[in-house]
Amino acid sequence: MNNNLLQLKQELKEELSHNILPFWMEKMVDKIHGGYYGQMTGKNQLVPDAPKGGILNARILWSFSSAALYFKNKLYVEYAKRAKEYLFKYFFDAENGGTYWMLHADGTPADTKKQIYSQAFFIYALVEYYRVTGDKECLDKAIELFNLIEKHSFDGELNGYFEAYSRDWVLLKDLRLSEKDANEKKTMNTHLHILEAYTNLYRVWKDDRLKRQLKNLIGIFLDKIINPETHHLDLFFDENWVCKSTLYSYGHDIESVWLLDEAAVVLGEAALLKRVRARVIKVADAAAEGLQANGSIINEKNYITGHTDANCDWWPQAEAMVGFFNVYELSKEEEYAEKTLAIWEFIKQFIVDKNAGEWHWSVSATGEINEHDDKAGFWKCPYHNSRMCLELISRIHE
């Protein structure tokens, strides 16, 4: 097994440094308007006048910053700096605070709503850039965003975080991240990425309120979001934490496994960490229900109707590799490492674009490439796959 893992480590180094990041460095740099282009189609056609999403740009900043942090590569720092400078120039709302959801290609605001999910990603990215450069401006801005989320989004009465606000921080009627989401006040997805952001911020800023809120977020997952009977994550809730969804999202299940463990480790409370680890192994086993014979993990299942989304999007594959390896580290049971290796074989065969670079959005259950969704775009970023590479490279030891 160890030789297989060392081989995996080497392949992931090559995948990140020779395929994923070069795609963004060589094909997505916008030399006219600054920053990075907003879209390349699934047929590898650049859309130079496409809008630029806040999530895409924050994730680009995180990816190059994190790669620079691990590899000590000054070139990656320069590409991260390009993203950072663009964010500060165009995405921040100087009047009301927070970040815009989307810009036109020329940098003017296209959608000024304050989606909390997006604010969290800016924290996550700004902190990572601070970790590699020591840029105090980024840490200060991350703290400012933390304070805005706590001021406007935190539900002090019923706990948790509301989803979306207008430019001047009025709660919106349409709270959805995307059209496929339920229009509910509280979601697993936003809470997961606030958790992720607060974890990264607490690494570098040991603030008492931040610590309290990070611990509270872990508790929300343990007590409200992880279903005590199925061990899957419930996805949508009203303000009273009544579940409003009927889906299992296998990618989010397995992503939560390692993000919750990471949060508890960074928080540093032994009793809570023990509680988290007992639960996340059960969540990983629940997520494994989505694994297929070819090594892949499918997207979703409606547990009422039994209908499945059997497509294999790029990001659940990446998150499953980290999540199952995390459980391998905790349990020392080789079946979890074998799941990680099997998923990688599937990714190499079907998801990696060996000709044009980066990864395809998804393939069908029978391995047919989906060219209808973006190669790069509002949601398709170098974040899940580059993070998977970096996590496993750092976890696999000689």
Image (cartoon, rainbow, N blue to C red):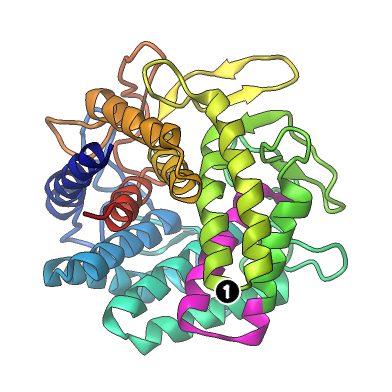
Q: Position of residue 168 (x, y in %)?
A: 65, 71
Q: Is residue 346 above or below residue 214?
A: above
Predominant SS along the magenta part: helix
Quarter of the figure with the N terminus: top left
Q: Quadrant of residue 314?
A: top left
Q: Position of residue 67 (x, y in %)?
A: 25, 62
Q: Which region shows up in magenta?
A: 185-211
Q: For mark 1, what is the residue?
A: 268
Observer-nearest of 233 and 127? 233
Left or right, 95 with respect to 305, comes to left
| Residue 376 covered by magenta stretch | no
Crowd rating for badge 1 (residues with CA inside 10 Å; few <14, some 14–19, many 20+) = few
Observer-nearest of 70 and 164? 70
Q: Position of residue 177 (x, y in %)?
A: 59, 47
Observer-nearest of 228 and 364? 228
Q: Quadrant of residue 63?
A: bottom left
Quarter of the figure with the C terminus: bottom left
Specify whether residue 256 is in view: yes
